[in-house]
Amino acid sequence: MRVPLSWLREYAQVPGEASAEDVMAELVKVGLEEEAVHRPTDTLSGPIVVGQVLSVEKEPQTNGKTINWCQVRVVPEGAEQTLTADGIDPSGVQGIVCGAHNFVEGDKVVVTLPGAVLPGDFRIAARKTYGHVSAGMIASVRELGIGEDHDGILVLSTLGLDPEVGSDAMELLGLYDQAAEINVTPDRSYCFSIRGIAREYAHATGSAFTDPAAAVVVDPADGAGYPVRLEDQAPIYGNAGCDRFVARVVRGVDATRPTPQWMVSRLRLAGIRSISLPVDISNYVMLELGQPTHCYDVARLTGEVVVRRANAGETIVTLDDRKRELHPEDLLITDGSGAIGIAGVMGGAATEVSDSTTDVLVESAHFDEVSIARARRRHKLPSEASKRFERGVDWHVADVAAQRVVDLLVRLAGGTADASITDVGTAPQPILIDLPAGYASQRIGMDFAPEQVVGALTDLGADVAEYDGGWQVTAPSWRQDLTIKDDLAEEIARLVGYDQIPSRLPVAPPGRGLTRTQQQRRRVLAALAGAGLTEVLSYPFVSMEANDTFGAAEGTGPAVKLANPLSAEFGYLRRSILPGLIEVAKRNSSRGFRDLALFEAGLVFLPQETLGTATIPPLGALPDDATLETLYNGLPLQPLTIAAVFFGKDSPAAAGHSPRAWDWADALDTVRLMADVVGVDLVIEQGEHRAFHPGRTARISLRSGEELGYAGELHPKLVAAQDLPPRTVALEINADLLFDAAPDVIVARHLSTFPATTQDVALVVDAGLPADEVLATLREGAGELLEEVHLFDVYSGQGIGDGKKSLAFGLRFRATDRTLTADEASAARDQAVHLAAERHGAVQRR
C-alpha cells in the first residue's frame, strides 16, 4: 500500500517536515512493515516552470523531419528573470527546439530550464541543435516521470489547468509529494486504505485521528432507487456471495472533464494511473476508504441488476477485452443481457463508462472473501479491488463510499444525484469477545493496567463494556481478524508498544529437550557429515519406473499417486530416497564434480491396505476425533530413511598421496558407522536387489531378523542409463527400525589395562556359507575372553577343494583381571573352532 503523505496529513497529524522514512518508522512500531519510498524529487529537480508558447516556426529538415523553433515565455510579462543559471535568458523568453506538434501559440506548457535534471539523470543544458541554441526543453509526461505518454508534450489546458507563467511546475503537478509504501499482511486488510493507515499512525504517535468516513454525510436509503436483487443459490460454506449492495445514480455527468491534478498526482504516487474522471474518482475513494466501487453506464444497462452465481457455459468480456468462460462458482453482477461484471474482480466491457456516458450507476457492495479469492485465482485476474475484497472489507462503509463517489461526481463532473437510493442486504452480527481481567497480562508476560486495556481497545474502535471479572468487547466492523480474546491480547500489546514488553531468558524445565529419536537422528547425521559426506535434499516426487526399480528388492510395489502432480513424469510419492539422490549426483557429475559422497535423510511413503478416505471432510470446519482418526489411518507409512551415493575418489590427489576409489566396502562401512553411533549390532550378508550389482550387494538386517536395507555397488545397466561414473556405490536403510533397535543407554566397554593376545585361524567351509554366520559362531564359541573377531581374508582356488572357500579370522583375547597365557588363548580359540566344525562342518586349515 503506497501512502502519499499529503493525503495522510488530511486525517493524521503528520508533521510538515516528516519524510516518508519518518512515517514508516512510526508505522513499524505498530507492526506494519516498511517496503519502499516513492519520491519524485529523488530523480527530478528544477528549475521546471510553467511557460507560454509565444511563437512557433516550423522548419523542415533534410532528414524529412520538421522541427519547431519556439519562443517560450517563462516569467510573467514585464517581470524580471531571477534565475541566473548558464543558458537562462535574462529577458524571460527562452528559445527552444521542439519536435512535438501537439501545441500551438498561446498554450501553456512545462518547461525544463538549463540546470534541471530529469529521471534517468538526463541533465538539461543549452545546446546547439538544428542550427539553433536550444536553451531548455518543453517536456512530455514521460520525460517528467509522471506517465507513459510520449506522443506529444504536456499541454496544461488538457489537465484543466491555467497557471501563472513562471510558476513552479513541480508544485503544480504535485511532484514535491512523497509516498511511503507499506507491506500489509493479509490479516490487516483495513490498512489497504488511507483511512486505515492514518488510524495506525495515530496509534503509533498518540496523535489525533480524523476518520474520513465520519466526514461523509450519507443520504438515507429509501429503496426506490435502481432495482437490485441479491440471489445466491450456491453459497460457499453457507456464506452468501453478496450481503450488501448499494446503488446510486448520478445523471448529467460530463465524463470528458479532466481529472483534477491533485487527484491525479495522489493516484500516481499511490501506484494507479489516471484513466478518466469517473474511474479516477472510483479508485480515489477505494484508496481513501478501503471500499472498492464500480461505475456503470446506465444507458448500457438492461433491466434490474441481479447478483448471482454463473450459469454453466456462461461467458463475459471483461474490461481488458478478454472473453472469459465462467465457472458455476463465480459470483456475477448481471442485468437483463447477462453478465456485466465478475463481482469484486473486474467489470464487463459491455457497460463500461466512456466519454459519451452521461448517467452513471455507482455500485458499492460487500462480497464474500472466499468467493472473490477463488474467482481471482481462477481467472488469473489480480486487481486492487479483489486484493481488498478477498482480505475483508468493512460492511458498514459501503454506503459511505457510494456517497463519497456521488459527491465527487457531482462536484467534479457536474452531475446531479438521484434522490432515490438502493441499499439491499443484511448486516452481519457484531463480534462479541469476552476478555477476562488479567488475561492479556498472562498471555503477553507484562502487567497491563485496566486503563491501558480499555484505552488500547477503545483506540482500536472497539466498544468496551465492563462486567464483573473483565470486559465484553465489540470488535470494530473493519477488524474481521479480531475474533477471540487472544487477538485482543495481541492488539493490546501492539498498541501499548512491543518495546515495553520485558525480555527475560526462560529457564528450561528439567526433563525436557530433544526426544530419544531426535537425539539419535542428530548423532547419526553428524557422524555422516563428520565422515566427509555432504547432506543434500531432493524432491519426493518420482516416476513409477523409479519406484519399481528402487522401492523394493523384488521390484514392483504399491505407490502413492499424486492427484495433481507438478509434472506427469513425476506423478508418485517416493518409496525410496535413492532416485532423487541419484538425480542430485547426476546433476553434479554433469557439472564437473567427479568425486562425490552425498547423503540424505528423509521420509518415504509406503501405502498400506487402506489409503485415503472415501470422502473428504468439508472445509471451514474442524473435523471431529473420529474423522481425524479415519484420515490418519488412510495415510501411508512414512518411515525415516537414510541413503547415500558415492562415486569417484575418496580424497583429492596430492603430493605423496594417491586417492582411493570409493567401492562397495565404503558403503558397508558407512552403514556400520551409523549402527555404531546408536549402539546397534548388524547382520550383513549377501543380498539381491534389482537396483544393485548382482554380486556386490549386501543385505543389512538386525539380529532379530528385521531387514534394514541394502548397500553395495549399483547395477551397471542402471549406472549407464543414468550416465553416472562406473562403479557408483549406494546404500539405503530404514532409520526408524535402526533407532527402535538401539538401546536407551549405550554402555561403554571396560578398558582393560592388561595386554591382549591375538590368534589367527583359517577355516575351510562350503562356498555358499555366509562368512558372517561363521564369525558369529566363533564369537559364541570363544567365550568371555574374546574381545574382538574379524574376517581378514577369503580364499578359494589351488589347495582348496571344489565348492569350498577358506575364511581367515583374527581373534583378539583379553582378560579384565590378569594377563592371559598363550595356552588360555589357544584353548579359547580351539573351543571356537570346535563349535564351527559342529555347526558348519568347518575344517581348520593348517
Image (cartoon, rainbow, N blue to C red):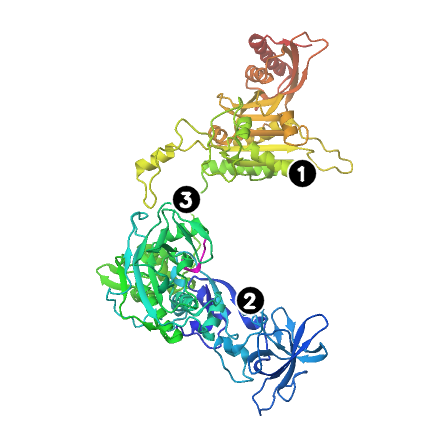
| Comes first in the chain, label 3 or label 2 | 2
How much space separates mark 3 and mark 2, taking CA atoms?
66 Å
For the residues labelled 1 and 2, say whether their Cβ atoms are less than 8 Å apart: no
How much space separates mark 3 and mark 1, taking CA atoms?
51 Å
| Comes first in the chain, label 3 or label 1 | 3
Was residue 382 drawn as part of the magenta stretch in this picture?
yes
Q: Is residue 377 visible?
A: no
Q: Nearer the viewer, residue 613 or 439?
A: 613
Q: Which residues are magenta?
A: 381-385
Q: Is residue 742 visible?
A: yes
Q: Quadrant of residue 749?
A: top right
Which residue is the site of mark 3?
Answer: 510
Q: Quadrant of the C terminus?
A: top right
Q: Between tags 3 and 2, which lies in front?
A: 2
Q: Quadrant of the N terminus?
A: bottom left
Say what secondary structure mark 2 lies in. Answer: loop
Q: Tell me the residue at 49%/25% (across/down).
A: 557
The 10 Å Cα crowd at callout 3, few under 14, some 14 to 19, many 20 or more, is: few
Which residue is the site of mark 2?
Answer: 148
Say what secondary structure mark 3 lies in. Answer: loop
**Residue lying farthest to the right in this orientation:** 655
The amino acid type of the residue labelled 1 equals: Ser
Q: Residue 241: where, in percent of width, then height?
A: 32, 53
Which residue is the site of mark 1?
Answer: 590
Q: Between tags 3 and 1, which lies in front?
A: 1
State whether the magenta stretch is mostly helix, strand or loop. loop
